[in-house]
Image: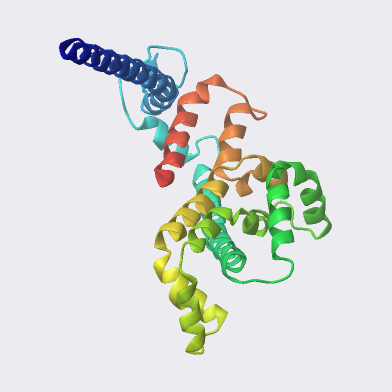
């Protein structure tokens, strides 16, 4: 009787183990397939950026050809930065994007962390109402306000400027405070109470106690604040207008491929620009 029960348990154990093994195998196969699907276009762009093909003695920039280039080189990058046609100043676009992203990440980080600290550690009458309003507003995508923002900026003559982009990206950043608030919530209130007994103000507590022990959330907030403006296309396209010297890299590369002078021969140059754009993010 005991032997039968033992064998039954062993069979059940083997069955569970086999099911887990099968599940693990299928999960890994699915992950490998998804990874290939995700990495395929990225690898294609990178290989295209270094693709160098010549026909009749001239460099050809084309999407047609083998997946792996027959020859590699930096010619596409040289053409990109040289601005051979004088109409695609990539270097200026890169500098513009860097300026916008740098100032935005400073302002946005300060605003987001400040609002998160207030919502987490300071109690006031309208606090719960504000939290509810912030959740509701967060349900709507930002581009829904694009037309209104454009006409507001136009009325004060700020359209077509990098300052307008910095203002737009930074102004609404405070509503993205929920992740930082969650981090501040786990910081013991006893630290604040002790500091207040010693005569510290809320601003001193925030800068000298809260921020020094909140490096992970500061880095997280700063990275998101930088990446957003660096990769944004919609607001930059609407606000910057038609002055090509004021474009960011997202708008500039789009215009290079799909603007008035459309040409598939620019694809490898576009790919080189995409690789350059990805470097700061990586």
Q: Return the residue found at the far left.
A: 3
Q: Considering only vertical position in the picture, is 130 above or below 273? A: below
Foreground of the two, 247 or 11: 11
Q: Residue at x 54, y 34 (%)?
A: 85
Q: Residue at x 51, y 25 (%)?
A: 266
The chosen color scheme is: rainbow
Please state the horizontal and vertical placement of residue 183, each as a whole percent of the image: 48, 58
Please state the horizontal and vertical placement of residue 118, each as a whole percent of the image: 61, 68
Q: Is residue 196 left or right of residue 8?
A: right
Foreground of the two, 229 or 179: 179
Q: Return the residue found at the far bottom.
A: 199
Please state the horizontal and vertical placement of residue 217, each as a whole percent of the image: 45, 58
Quick check: can you spot residue 92? yes
Foreground of the two, 32 or 150: 32
Quarter of image, res 211: bottom left
Q: Considering only vertical position in the picture, is 116 above or below 160? A: below
Please state the horizontal and vertical placement of residue 3, each as a whole percent of the image: 15, 12
* Image quarter hosting the C terminus: top left
Q: Residue at x 55, y 59 (%)?
A: 181
Q: Considering only vertical position in the picture, is 8 above or below 167? A: above
Q: Considering only vertical position in the picture, is 277 above or below 54? A: below
Q: Is residue 17 left or right of residue 90?
A: left
* Image quarter hosting the N terminus: top left
């Amino acid at each position: 009787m005991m032997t039968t029960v033992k064998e039954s348990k062993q069979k059940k154990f083997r069955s569970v183990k086999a099911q887990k093994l099968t599940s693990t195998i299928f999960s890994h196969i699915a992950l490998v397939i998804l990874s290939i699907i995700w990495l395929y276009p990225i690898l294609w762009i990178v290989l295209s950026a270094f693709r160098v093909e010549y026909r009749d003695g001239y460099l050809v920039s084309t999407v047609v050809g083998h997946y792996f280039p027959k020859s590699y080189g930096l010619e596409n990058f040289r053409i990109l930065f040289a601005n051979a046609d004088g109409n695609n100043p990539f270097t200026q676009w890169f500098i513009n994007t860097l300026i916008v992203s740098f100032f935005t990440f400073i302002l946005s980080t300060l605003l987001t962390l400040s609002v998160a600290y207030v919502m987490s550690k300071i109690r006031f009458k309208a606090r719960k109402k504000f939290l509810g309003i912030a959740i509701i507003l967060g349900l709507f995508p930002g581009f829904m306000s694009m037309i209104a923002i454009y006409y507001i900026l136009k009325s004060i003559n700020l359209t077509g400027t990098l300052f307008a982009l910095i203002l737009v990206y930074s102004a609404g950043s405070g509503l993205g405070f929920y992740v930082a608030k969650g981090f501040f919530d786990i910081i013991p209130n006893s630290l604040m109470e002790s500091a207040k007994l010693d005569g510290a103000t809320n601003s001193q507590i925030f800068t000298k106690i809260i921020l020094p022990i909140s490096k992970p959330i500061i880095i997280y907030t700063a990275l998101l604040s930088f990446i957003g403006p660096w990769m944004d296309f919609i607001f930059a396209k609407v606000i910057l207008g038609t002055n090509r010297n004021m474009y960011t890299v997202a708008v500039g590369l789009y215009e290079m491929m799909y603007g008035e002078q459309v040409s598939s021969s620019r694809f490898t140059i576009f790919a080189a620009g995409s690789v350059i754009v990805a470097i700061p993010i990586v």
